[in-house]
Amino acid sequence: MEVLRIKAIDTYTIRYKMLRPNGTLEDCMFQGDHDELTFHLGAFVDKKLVSVASFYFEKHPLFEQAYQYRLRGMATLPEYQGQGHSSALLRTAFPVIKQNQCPILWCNAREKAMGYYIKVGFKATGELFTIQNIGKHILMSVNID
Ligand SMILES: CC(C)(COP(=O)(O)OP(=O)(O)OC[C@H]1O[C@@H](n2cnc3c(N)ncnc32)[C@H](O)[C@@H]1OP(=O)(O)O)[C@@H](O)C(=O)NCCC(=O)NCCS
């Protein structure tokens, strides 16, 4: 498996299939996808893109750190799940986030994915909340040191 920087457009197929199956292509285009400090990572197996994640320079008001990164669009194709692809993307992202002077990475985690985030070191803050058409989420974060 190989982790590479990819473009926003490269993430859309997996985002669509795994995160917005009842949505439109536009629903797979996230705000900030093309911002200067945004980066997108992909895991490749035999040259096939199997897992994606995107990282945005964005502050959450509940966290005090001035500089923060947000994780969005993390997904692995079903037949490749449980093989360490998403965690490899995170391991690659951490030093980049640190280099950008950000000591924290946060995400609005789907309830179903909470177990995954806990496994890779995230902690939950607050209560579950609902995002329309998608379902229950919880704010989660990990310190990067
Ligand atoms: C959540 C998701 C991104 C994890 O991707 P993945 O490539 O399968 O993750 P990894 O293989 O790197 O998993 C890392 C560890 O977390 C565990 N794990 C993965 N998904 C889990 C889950 N839902 N609950 C509990 N543990 C989980 C793995 O077993 C692995 O444990 P190990 O280190 O003991 O072997 C993937 O299941 C997915 O695409 N889900 C559907 C889309 C989604 O919900 N995305 C998150 C949006 S917030």
Image (tube, helix red, strand yellow):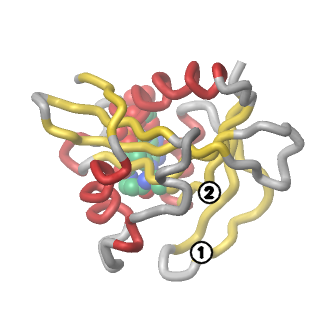
Q: Is residue 92 above or below residue 77?
A: above
Query: Which residue sits at x=54%, y=48%?
Result: 35
What count of labels does the image hold?
2
Whereabouts is ligand 1, in terms of quadrant?
Answer: top left
Horizontally, residue 69 falls left or right of residue 21, namely: right
Q: Going 89% across and 42% down the picture, which residue do you hit?
A: 64
Q: Are marks 2 and 1 in contact (CB under 8 Å)?
A: yes
> Residue 3 in the image: x percent, y percent?
32, 26
Q: Quadrant of residue 47?
A: top left
Where residue 131 is drawn, which disc sits there?
A: 1
Q: Residue at x 42, y 31 (%)?
A: 89
- The reply to whether the residue tagged 1 has its Cβ within 8 angstroms of ligand 1 is no
Q: Amino acid at mark 1?
A: Ile
Q: Is mark 2 within 8 Å of ligand 1?
A: yes
**Above/below status of 50 relative to 78:** above
Which of the pair 101/36 is nearer the observer? 36
- In the displayed structure, 87 sits above or below 10; it is above
Which one is in front, 89 or 32?
32
- Is disc 1 placed on a helix, strand or loop? strand
Find disc 2 in the rendering and name its residue.
108
The residue depicted at 84 percent of the width and 46 percent of the height is: 63
Q: Quadrant of residue 118?
A: top right
Quadrant in which the C terminus appears: top right
Q: Is residue 140 above or below residue 110?
A: above
In this picture, residue 97 sits left or right of residue 52: right
Query: Looking at the image, which residue sits at the far front?
Result: 36
Residue 14 position, x and y percent, is 28, 55
The crowd level at tag 2 (other Cα within 10 Å; few <14, some 14-19, many 20+) is some
**Which quarter of the rendering shows the N terminus?**
top left
